[in-house]
Amino acid sequence: MSSSASTGTSTGTTSVERPASGPAPAPGPRTSVKAAAGIAALAAIGPATWGTTYVTTTELLPPDRPLLAAALRALPAGLILLALTRRLPRGDWWWKAAVLGVLNFGAFFPLLFFGAYRLPGGVASTISAVMPLLVAGFGIGVLKVRPTRRTLLAGLVGVAGVALLVLRGSAAVDLAGIVAMLTATTLMALAVVLSKRWGRPEGVSLLTLTGWQLTAGGLVLAPIALTAEGLPDHFTGANIAGYAYLGIIGTAIAYALWFRGIERLPASSVAFLGLTNPVVATLAGLVFLGQTLTVWQLGGLVLVLASVLLGQQRRAAQRA
C-alpha cells in the first residue's frame, strides 16, 4: 500500500500481485525473518485488542444498543484522525474509502455488536475464526491466487482450536446472533482482500487512510443509530470509559496496526493473526469474569497458536 516498496511477493501461503493504485511495500526477499515477525506481531495487536470487545460491551456499555455502540466507536475516532492528518481522499479513493469504510466499520461494527449482545463471547469468537478460510476463498477471485493445502489445513486447525478454547456445553445458541457474526466475518474477510488489492495512495499515511474509512463508516451509522435506537437517558462513567477505550485503543490504534499488516503481509498470513482475537477474549473472561480453563480449552489454545504459526511459517522459511 505505500509506494516505496513492492507487494509482488510470492509465499507458501499466497502470492500477491501489485495493485495498479500503488500498494505499500511488503517485506521483500531481503527482509529478515525477524523484521517480518515484527510486522506480524504489531498487526496482531489489532485483533488481540478486539478480543476485549465482548467483555467491554457486556460490562461497560449501555444494554441493547449495538448501532449506537458501533457509531460511537467509529465516527469520533475517524474525525479525530481526519483532524490530525488534515487530508481528504482524491479521485477514485472517495468511493474506495467509502466501500472499505462500510465493510470494515459501517456494516461490520453493528453486526459485531449485535452478535456480542446476543451470543457468549466464545460462540462469537468461534464463528470469526473462519476468516482465514474466507480470505483464502476471496483471494481466488480478487487476488487471483489459490490457497495452498497448508493454508487450508491451518485454517481448519484454527477453527477446531478456537472451538475447543471458547465453546462450552452451556453456550447459548442464538440464530440471529450467529447469522450476524458470520456476515460480519465475511465482510471483514472481503475488506482484507480488497485492501490488499487496492493498496494505499502514494504519500498517504496509514492513519489518514484509517481516518477516511472510520469517518465513512461512522457517517453511515450515526443517523441510523440515532433514528433506530436513540441515546440513553444518561451516560455513566463506565459507559464513557467503555466507548473511549473501544474508540481510541480498540479502533483508531488497533486498525492502523491491522491495516499496516495487511499492506505488508500476504492476505492469508494476516488473516491467521485474527485468531489472537478469541485467545484474548478467553483470557479476558479469565481475568475479568472469573472463568477457568479446562484441559480441553488448554488443548484448544495450543491448536490456535499452532494454526497462527502454520499460517506464517512457510513465509518465514522462504525468507530465511
Image (tube, grey):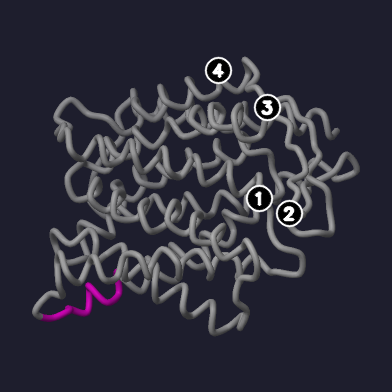
User: Residue 156: x and y, percent?
Assistant: 47, 20
Q: Nearer the viewer, mark 1 or mark 4?
A: 1
- Residue topped by disc 3: 145
Residue 21 is tagged as: 2
Seen from the viewer's position, the closer of residues 306 and 261 is 261
Q: Which residues are magenta?
A: 234-242
Identified by mark 2, the residue type is Ser
Q: Within 10 Å of the Cα at label 1, are there few (<14), some (14-19), or many (20+) other Cα atoms?
A: some
CA gap between label 3 and label 1 equals 15 Å
State the quadrant of the N terminus. bottom right
Could you tell me the amino acid type at mark 1?
Trp
Dot 1 lies on which element?
A: helix
Q: Is residue 235 magenta?
A: yes
Between discs 4 and 3, the one toward the N terminus: 3
The one nearer the camera, 121 or 92, is 92
As measured in the structure, the alpha-carbon distance from the residue carrying label 1 to the one carrying label 2 is 6 Å
Residue 12's label in the rendered image is none
- Numbered disc 4: secondary structure: helix
Residue 153: numbered disc: 4
Amino acid identity at mark 4: Leu
Q: Amino acid at mark 3?
A: Val
Q: Give SS at disc 3.
A: loop
